[in-house]
Amino acid sequence: MARILTVTLNPALDLTVRLGQLVPGRLTVAR
């Protein structure tokens, strides 16, 4: 069960991290 959770959570965490890096960059570009 734990292995299934990690497999599903890892991509989600990766996406949130990438979005967290992209959004501030786009905000600074928009200014």
Image (tube, rainbow, N blue to C red):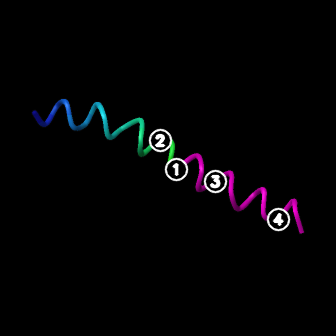
| Left or right of 25 in this view: 18 | left
1 or 4: tag closer to the N-terminus? 1
Q: On the image, numbered disc 2 is attached to which residue?
A: 14
SS under mark 2: helix
Mark 2 is surrounded, within 10 Å at the Cα level, by few (under 14), some (14 to 19) or many (20 or more) other residues, namely: few
Tell me, for residue 17, which label it has, or none.
1
Q: Which residues are magenta?
A: 17-31
Q: Mark 2 touching mark 1, by CB under 8 A?
A: yes
Q: Disc 1 residue type?
A: Val
Q: Spatial distance from mark 1 to mark 4, Cα to Cα?
A: 18 Å
For the N terminus, the image quarter is: top left
2 or 4: tag closer to the N-terminus? 2
Q: Spatial distance from mark 2 to mark 1, Cα to Cα?
A: 5 Å
- Seen at 25% across and 36% down, the residue is 6
Residue 16: x and y, percent? Answer: 50, 50
Q: On the image, numbered disc 3 is attached to which residue?
A: 21
Mark 1 is surrounded, within 10 Å at the Cα level, by few (under 14), some (14 to 19) or many (20 or more) other residues, namely: few
Residue 9: x and y, percent? Answer: 32, 40
Give the quadrant of residue 5. top left
Is residue 13 inside the magenta stretch?
Answer: no
Q: Mark 3 touching mark 4, by CB under 8 A?
A: no
SS under mark 3: helix
Q: Spatial distance from mark 3 to mark 4, Cα to Cα?
A: 11 Å
| Left or right of 24 in this view: 15 | left
